Image (cartoon, grey):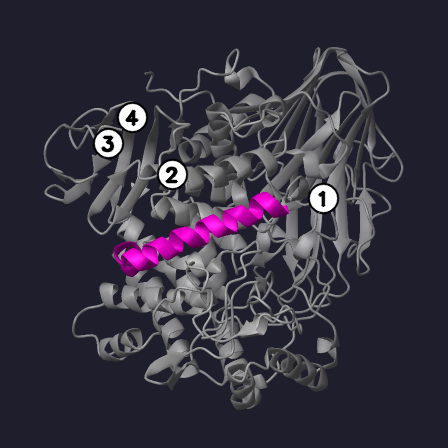
Amino acid sequence: MSPDAPPARIMSHLSTDDWEHAMVTGNGRQGVLVYGGPSALRLTLSHERLFLPVDEPLDPPATARLLPDLRALALAGRYQEAADRVVEFAAASEPGYRRLRWPDPFIGAATLCFSWFDRPGGGPWRRTVDLATGVVRQSSGDLVHEVFVSRVRDVIAVRVTAPAGLSGRLHLGPVAGAPPVPIAFRVDGPCPTARVGDLCPTARVGDLCLTARVGDLCLTAAFPTAWPGGVAGYSTACRVIASAGTVSPLVGGGVDIDGVPQLLLLARTSVAVAGVPEVYAGAPCSTESVCRVPLLTEGLEDVPTDFESLLAEHEPAHRTLFDRCRLNLHSVASPGPAEERPLEALLAEPTASPALVVRLFDAGRYAIICASGERPPTLQGVWSGTFDPAWRGGYTVDGNLQAATAALYATGTPELMLPVFDLLDGFRDQMRDNAARLYGAPGLLVAPHMTTHGRHNHFHPRWCLTFWTAGAAWCARLYYDHWRFTGDTGFLAERALPFMREAAEFYAAYTRSRDGLLCFAPSYSPENSPAGEDGPQCCVNATMDVAAVRDLLRNLLEATASDDPSRGAWRDLLERLPPYRVGADGALAEWLWPGLENNHAHRHASHLYGLWYEPDPVLLDDPDLRAAAATAVRRRLAWWREAGDEMAFGLVQLGLAAAALGLAEEAYETVERLVLRYWRPSGVSTHNAGAIFNTDVCGGLPAVVVAMLVRTRGERIDLLPARPGAWPAGEIRGVRLRGGRRLDRLAWSPGEVAVWVDGAAPAAISAPPGTTVRLNGHVVQLASSLNQVRDGR
């Protein structure tokens, strides 16, 4: 069995003019959608901070004064009245709340279109993504387009070659569609009367664009609706460099090219923030919120004008992230080398071949790596080709963001989680304000939707996310896991514990004692209603709320010293949390309040939260609860089979829970459904089956696959806990484990699991010398040079 994973490449023969079917590349800060066909190449550029100011952020309404009445209504089962009361109060206190408010939308910056007067090439159309380098390549005969985004220079590099010479037009403009608010666009191209290096005679000091040179293009946009801290505008600047032939400027922006054998384009988008002197990507902004862009190509002048040298310095920075984890499932069922088969052919097969799973495991990791910069991936990663993305394309914290980042630790890239914490820490003051104004409590309340601010502005009589209080506890698990995976005690002390403590403060103040147990009222299980409740999703004691807070309190006790003065209060809260409940249908109950029964016809599986990270011990050790959790997984899967295809990351939730329970075939069913229904031939996932560009399961799929192959619980490491029959042999390298351990290589074949430990080459599990782990019941002392475990699988 070869130790080498298959080549990391996506290939397709399909052409498209739809940005949602584009192949992608990015460096976390800049994103590029690459699409088109032999006669026209399209590149739509994005920037991680480009959010169009549409709805001014508002202070949350002071609904804390309603809390006694809301509790009473919820406890009496008058859920619709509770939801209506909050919405009516918000609308009466602030006219802006008379409609549902969303965060600022994540928009595309610009589209570059290369259209050829005479179609070059003439061969079959082929497009590929080299996942290990980040290069997207499209070709037709001798015509070749290559695109990547440098991690070193923060620049988009495009090379277009045709030995016989290119003749055509290059145009730069806004993305298609009408923006929801006014935008002052200006497209500047080379001045027809200027010589190289001359100032454009029509430019005035203070204009959006101050200079123009032959071969330069720039799109600038000012947002008149910007407010302090919001985005005031942006510019997309381009340099166009021809190896030979002629480049002729066009009035109004654009260039014609003739007889050019090789064309190099360097581009970058810069974003300006209103009222902030230190701004992003070098684009300052006046206090009047008018974006003033300096030189068209400022910052691009020092970039080498050689594609190969730019790629040579970029590739190691990208490859070191991608190569940290590799999967190989050793498929021999597909005819010919699997990596040479177009992805559309693999997706059209009736079952998920091992080759397809490996391909999309790699493609998913690639997309999340490309979309993680100073900010984490949005719903659409770092890519947008519209002014109106689904759900505004922001950070949705009741499941989407967590799914997108779910594999970053396990697959060896913990540094890519830091943008999540930078985002959350930047909104801490607003989270405190949310808690105080909505619930009259100290601590943190995380808004479910965020982009440029963290204020809770979402109020709706059915989608009553104002009652969802589990966000801070869920985010606290991410902080805690960063320490568990990396062993970074500085992060624990300076970032994780402060967030965790404030999260616990909120729950201590918010919950009330009832019959000796804590009560969460009102409560919310995203985005479901109990059986028989056709109205709002308001409820009492959602299992997710209780499970997330139990996890938070247990982690605080684990991570703090024995003399910490808060430990007594945390332990008291932990002991008074209501226990899990088995519903009348035999499945783990989604609500712990008597009379609220399961509704399995739903896309989320929030009541299985206790199985997604380090499993709640009682869910694995109590036979009745373990059986009930397994029943819950199976009932949800049965609904998916009958109802068709819903939101993809709900399958990730089910897959993680199934893997934790050792339900190999159920976990595999989630993987098979994900890869066959929620991926496009471009190598990017969708939110619904075949619809809505979305990167949630780009992170979620690899997380489920790893959970099926390796499970940790305290000092115990189980190998292949949920390996399905469809994967009889394979290997995985570069898996990180909690406790600072690392699974460098795990290889299995029928009857054998091979593990090499510190000092051997290659190592399989590395940890501090003397660490004791359990591998499928075998105790391994991590000080020997070689251990091999045979478990009869």
User: Distance from label 2 to label 4 (Cα)?
Assistant: 16 Å
Instruction: Say which residue label 4 marks.
Output: 748
User: Distance from label 4 to label 3 (Cα)?
Assistant: 12 Å
Instruction: Say which residue label 1 marks.
Output: 385
Q: Is residue 630 magenta?
A: yes
Percent of width and height locating residue 779: 13, 40
Which quadrant, please, contains the C terminus? top left
Q: Earlier in the sequence, mark 3 or mark 1?
A: 1
Q: Is residue 130 visible?
A: yes
Q: Nearer the viewer, residue 189 or 749?
A: 749
User: Distance from label 3 to label 1 (Cα)?
Assistant: 43 Å
Looking at the rendered structure, the secondary structure element under dot 1 is loop
Magenta range:
616-643
Looking at the rendered structure, the secondary structure element under dot 3 is loop
Q: Earlier in the sequence, mark 4 or mark 3?
A: 4
Instruction: Say which residue label 2 marks.
Output: 664
User: Distance from label 4 to label 1 (Cα)?
Assistant: 43 Å
Label pair 2/1, CB-CB below 8 angstroms: no
Instruction: Say which residue label 3 marks.
Output: 764
